[in-house]
Each structure stands twice: as C-alpha cells, then as structure tokens.
C-alpha cells in the first residue's frame, strides 16, 4: 500500500505544480475591427498613434460611440507611468489594440491524461480497446453545405522515423469565393507533429477534373466514367462504385486468415487517349486493429521499441512494417493477353477516416477496358471506381495559410510555424485550428488538394497494457503471416462493432 | 520496475525534458511568466542572426517594418537592422516555466510502479509524452522568422506594434538598467 500512496502523492503534487503552467496568446486588432477584440483578455493595451500606451483592466470597447473606456495606467514612450485612473479613449487616436489571453498550457492537458485522468470515452475503449479512435490530423472542408471530413494527414507516420509528406484530394470540397477554410483537428489521444499544411490548387477543366497519381504527379483528366460491369463475391457492385457518395463497397474479413484475398472485376467502355483508373478508397479498421494489437503486445515496452526503431538499420526498420506488408494494398491488374492478369500498381494509401482519390495509369486495351482489383478481404472500403483519360500533366499552385486561428483571435505563432517551417506545430487532443487560404480566383474554378507533412505518436491506452506479451509481439514482426491467422478469430469477434466503437470514441474537447 | 531503475528513468526524464526544450534567447530574468507579461509595457527580447545562426544583434524589440526591425541597443538608442535575405530573427515574449513540466515528467516517472492502477505510468511512455509536452511548452513563447521571411510576423511583440514613433527620447530607458562592466 505504501508505495502506491507515495506514488499518488507524487502525482497530486505534480498536478498542482503543473497547474501553474500557462500559455500566453497575443493578438493585434485594428481600430476598424475593434468588434473582434477578445473579451477573455483581462488587460487591453491601447497603442496610440503617438507611441504612448494605455494598459486597461477592466476595459470596454464601444463600437457605436467609437471609444474605449477602462481603468488603468498611461505610459509614455519611455514606458514610464504618467497617469492612472479612468480613461475614455477615442479610437481615432489609436494605432492598434493588443490583447493577451492567458490560458492553461495544452502541455498540462497532455500530461494530465497520461497521469490517469481518462475521459468518459474510456468506457467505449474499455469495451473494445482496439477500436479506440485514432488517426492523425483530420481535415474538414465544406462540401458547399456542410463541413465534411475530407482528408487525414500522413496516416502511416506513427513514429518520427516514418515522417512523411501526404497529398490528399479534396475531391468533394465546394468552397465559395476566393477563401478556402480548412479545419484541422486532433480528435484522438495522440500527439501530432505537423511541419506544414499547404493547399494545392489547379484550374479545373470545364469538362473534367484534375487528379493525382501515386507518384505525386497531377493530371488534367476527362470526366470519370462509371463501370459497365462490377463483379465481386456478393454479386453486382456497380451501384456502390458508380459515384463518390459515401455509399461504399466493403466486405468482412476471412475468419481463419486475415490475409485472404478477394477480387473485384471491373469493365469500362473504351476511352480515347491515355486511360487511367480513378479509385476513391480508404482502409477499413482492420489495419488499425492490427496496429493497436501490436502496441498492446508491446505493452510497457512500447517506448523502448519506438526508440529502438528510430535507431534501427534499414533492414530492421523494414521488418517493422512486415505486418502491413502482409495485409497489403489494393493491387490493380489488367489482362495479360493470355488469360491471366498483370499487376500495374498497388494502392497503399493508408487511413480509415477519409477516402482518398488516386489515378492509376493503365495500358491501352482494345475494346472495353478491364481491370481487376485484388485486396485482403475486409481491409478496404471502396467508394468509387471510374475510368478517365489523362490529358496532360499540370502543376498546382501552392498556397500557405494567410491566417491561422485556434480560438477567436489569430494564432500568429502557429501560422509562422506552418509557413516558415522553422519549427513544427505540435497539437494535443482537442486542439482545433482553422486555416484560411486565399485563391487567385473563385474556389469553384479550382481542383483542390491538401499537402501535409509530419508524424504522430499514439498514446498508450491503459486497457492495452493488460495484453503485454513479448512472444506475440515478436511474432507480429517475424511471422506476420502466422500472426494474421492467429488473430483472425479475435478480430472476427470484434468486427461487427468496430465501426460504432471507433467513431464513438473520438476525443471531445471540454 | 525496481527502485534503481526508477531513479534511472526519472533522471533520464529530467534530462530529456531539458534537452528537448527550445532554448529561450532572452537573458535570465528578463521575461516574466505569462500572467505578468500580459501586462508588461515593453517589447519582447529579439536576437537577429545571420549565417549559421550566429547572433548579430540582440535587445528589446521596439518596432517592425516590412524590411527592417528596430531594437534597443546596448547604448539605449534605437538601432535599425535591414531584414535582408540572409538574416533571420528569433524572439521570446514570456517565460514558459518549463521547469514545472520537467519536474512533473520526472515525478511522474518516479511514480511508475508495476502494479495495478498505476500501470499507465510506464516510464518510457511518460518520458516520451512528458518530454514532448515540455518541449511544446518551451517553444510556445518563441517566434522565429527565417531568411527571406515576412518580418511583420514579429510586430505583435514589439514595444511599438503600431510603428516606431517619430520623437523617441534619446537615450531610451531600457526595461532593466544595464549592469556596469
């Protein structure tokens, strides 16, 4: 009992100490926009045109009378106090207003969670630990009516060594005017380390789209054509794959071997020019389940393992990805002319949250264009499969956010980090940023993509630690095929409720 | 986790919490915690640097224009520095108090014991999260503009964010009297 009580005392003392840790958010407001002054700022600094300054607490801004009133101190240019009391300041003499809001440091929230303060969502995680919500930064953009989850950044970058650049098509974004607003959120128990979030824009052809291929190239393309045939194990799948409409084609995993493959055979009418398959797809929760199961088996040694991974040579590092390799991506195959199939590409875009759209160039076929998709059963959800014709490469315009907000005022520090890339922007559960981009013309004329770079760290859930098993952990890396057979029954038992548990356990800021 | 291991991990936590911190360029004691700095009438501490981040000038930031910064020199006179494409600047505008977070990281790691309720205090995990948290807090008051960047991002942290007044008294008293050499 004594060690537990002393540990508890240490934790409580730590919480008290860290409760003193604050952060200061500063914002400048022009007199013309004084209605946006942040009322949470205890002090208002009124910088006058002559260089003197009033420090007011309390304060009040009256837009109708065009004055600011308050009690405080007047400072001269040398910042010597020259008067105290009540002041009424006409805004015509004001150069700029400055607010300073003192907030609890998000770093405290981070440590507080690790210290054992769990949110109510822990109930859902406890019921289905491998379905605890997790991802990477999520990005919301309007579809013209509602703000919609349209992209998730660098989903596979679960360690610093795996830091990567990710390009996601904002295929259903429908912003109005020249401004494009992107909302970036940290909705899981994760730390996100973000280098940049750039908007890429390409003028959209009047009779087609602009698409991205897997090599990072951008192409002007003809309007997508739905398949004339779509044959899967369940039968005709044309309805599900005809349009990008969140009506997805998906399947259940094999009950004895999670690596078991399935195929979908597609046929399209012939197109002129250079044909390409356009696929809108996302992973199911199977890869997420396997990742979290790996962390669970590693248990209390996860930190040591992550550190070792950072130092590992390339061969050892590749072994760490053996399990995801065994699950694989979506193989795209075309007829080889001899009754068989040739592979032309494998789609490996990771992430279970937002479908991404990719173009895969195909060889020209005589007559109709036939394509076979091959993937692990239950591992992928496909929203659209279409045929397009690539007309030529295009170069996108790159835009950085002209404004970043993390509350009512601007967050110039966050913007500086994302624009100058001098330091990463680190976000914690509940952090919510609004990034504004300005296009040269109306947003409706552009195809938009989001380029992000960074990595993220999953936080260990307490429910996982109970499964620590180093032998099973080793199996995930050294015998991925065997692990996928061993885990099949457990996954099948949880499969039906995974989606509901996952989406219901998002971190909600209070 | 044995007691000897706990001391090892707690020491490592304190060390990592320190080395993951972003260095604060201001002289010791020049900046105050956020609650105090919110009401401070002076500007932030700025360091203008050149190639290989070698310091060129440092002092209180007085004002910023599109292509220049003005800081208070050692002689208590405003000194303008043309931004140029090869210069950068880093400023700090409050004391982040990372000592508390580093201490918490170390304390939390000490609290790691291997039974029941406190399994979540896994030493390595606490170190990773605590070090990242401390690093995050230490960089919160730091603003950097690299070579070729827009120096107007520094304006909110200047003594005169609306621009340098035309009739500044010379010499201009500093925030703290400078010590005699």
Image (cartoon, coloured by chain):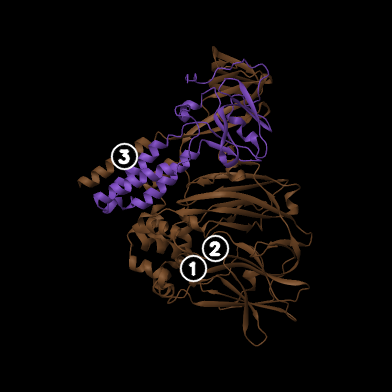
Chain colours: A brown, B purple
**What whole-number distance in Å separates the C-alpha atoms at marks 1 and 2?**
10 Å
The residue identified by callout 1 is A324
Badge 1 density bin: few <14, some 14–19, many ≥20, Cα 10 Å: some
Q: Are marks 1 and 2 in contact (CB under 8 Å)?
A: yes
Specify the farthest residue to the left. Answer: A1
Q: Residue A277's mark?
A: none
- Disc 1: host chain: A
- Camera-near label (3 vs 1) is 1
Would residue A411 be seen by someone viewing this image from the given angle?
Answer: no
Q: Respond whether the residues carrying marks 2 and 3 are from the same subunit.
A: yes
**What whole-number distance in Å separates the C-alpha atoms at marks 3 and 1?**
41 Å
Q: Is residue A484 above or below residue B84?
A: below
Q: Quadrant of residue B108?
A: top left
Residue A213 point in image, percent of width and height:
66, 65
The residue identified by callout 3 is A12
The residue identified by callout 2 is A350
Would residue A458 be seen by someone viewing this image from the given angle?
Answer: yes
Q: Earlier in the sequence, mark 3 or mark 1?
A: 3
Q: How many marks?
A: 3
Q: Are marks 3 and 1 in contact (CB under 8 Å)?
A: no
């Amino acid at each position: 009992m004594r060690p537990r009580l002393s540990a508890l005392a240490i934790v409580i003392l730590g919480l008290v100490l860290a409760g003193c840790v604050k952060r200061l958010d500063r914002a400048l407001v022009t007199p013309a926009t004084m209605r946006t002054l942040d009322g949470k700022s205890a002090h208002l600094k009124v910088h006058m045109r002559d260089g003197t300054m009033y420090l007011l607490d309390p304060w009040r801004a009256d837009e109708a009378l065009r004055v600011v009133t308050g009690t405080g101190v007047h400072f001269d240019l040398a910042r010597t106090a020259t008067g105290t009391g009540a002041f009424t300041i006409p805004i015509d003499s004001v150069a700029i207003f400055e607010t300073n809001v003192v907030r609890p440091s998000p770093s405290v929230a981070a440590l507080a969670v690790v210290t054992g303060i769990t949110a109510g969502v822990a109930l859902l995680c406890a019921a289905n630990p491998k379905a605890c919500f997790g991802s990477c930064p999520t990005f919301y953009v309007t579809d013209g009516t509602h703000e919609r989850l349209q992209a998730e950044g660098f989903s596979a970058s679960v360690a610093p060594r795996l830091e990567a650049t990710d390009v996601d098509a904002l295929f259903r974004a429908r912003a109005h005017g020249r401004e494009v607003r992107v909302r970036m959120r940290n909705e899981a128990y994760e730390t996100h380390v973000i280098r940049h979030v750039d908007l890429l824009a390409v003028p959209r052809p009047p009779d087609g789209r602009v698409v991205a291929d897997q090599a990072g190239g951008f192409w002007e393309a003809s309007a997508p054509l739905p398949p004339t045939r779509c044959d899967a194990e369940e039968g005709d799948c044309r309805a599900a794959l005809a349009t990008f409409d969140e009506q997805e084609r998906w399947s259940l995993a094999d009950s004895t071997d999670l690596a078991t493959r399935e195929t979908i055979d597609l046929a399209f009418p012939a197109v002129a020019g250079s044909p390409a398959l356009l696929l809108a797809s996302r992973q199911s929760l199977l890869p997420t389940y396997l990742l979290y199961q790996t962390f669970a088996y590693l248990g209390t040694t996860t930190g040591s393992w992550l550190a070792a991974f950072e130092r590992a040579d390339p061969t050892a590092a590749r072994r760490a990805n053996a399990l995801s390799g065994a699950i694989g991506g979506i193989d795209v195959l075309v007829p080889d002319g001899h009754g068989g199939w040739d592979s032309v590409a494998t789609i490996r875009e990771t992430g279970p949250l937002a479908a991404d759209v990719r173009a895969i160039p195909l060889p020209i076929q005589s007559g109709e264009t036939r394509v076979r998709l091959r993937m692990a059963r239950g591992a992928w959800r496909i929203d659209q499969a279409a045929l397009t014709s690539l007309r030529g490469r295009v170069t996108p315009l790159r835009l950085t956010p002209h404004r970043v907000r993390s509350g009512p005022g601007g967050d110039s520090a966050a913007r500086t980090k994302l624009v100058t890339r001098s330091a990463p922007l680190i976000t914690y559960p509940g952090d919510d940023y609004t990034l504004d981009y300005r296009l040269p013309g109306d947003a409706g004329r552009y195809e938009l993509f989001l380029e992000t770079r960074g990595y993220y760290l999953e936080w260990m859930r307490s429910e996982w630690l109970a499964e620590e098993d180093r032998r099973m952990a080793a199996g995930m890396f050294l015998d991925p095929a065997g692990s996928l057979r061993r885990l099949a029954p457990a996954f099948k038992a949880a499969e039906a409720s995974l989606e509901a548990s996952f989406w219901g356990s998002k971190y909600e800021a209070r | 986790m044995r007691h000897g291991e706990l001391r090892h991990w707690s020491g490592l936590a304190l060390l990592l919490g320190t080395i993951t911190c972003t260095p604060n360029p201001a002289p010791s004691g020049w900046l105050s915690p956020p609650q105090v700095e919110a009401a401070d009438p002076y500007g932030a501490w700025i360091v203008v640097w050149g190639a290989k981040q070698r310091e060129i000038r440092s002092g209180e930031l007085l004002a910023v224009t599109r292509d220049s910064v003005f800081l208070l020199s050692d002689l208590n006179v405003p000194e303008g520095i043309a931004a140029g494409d090869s210069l950068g600047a880093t400023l700090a505008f409050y004391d982040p108090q990372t000592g508390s977070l580093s201490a918490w990281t170390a304390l939390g790691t000490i609290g790691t014991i291997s039974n029941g309720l406190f399994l979540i205090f896994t030493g390595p995990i606490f170190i990773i999260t605590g070090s990242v948290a401390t690093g995050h807090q230490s960089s919160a008051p730091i603003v950097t503009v690299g070579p070729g960047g827009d120096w107007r991002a520094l304006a909110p942290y200047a003594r005169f964010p609306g621009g340098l007044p035309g009739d500044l008294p010379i010499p201009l008293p500093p925030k703290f009297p400078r010590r005699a050499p």
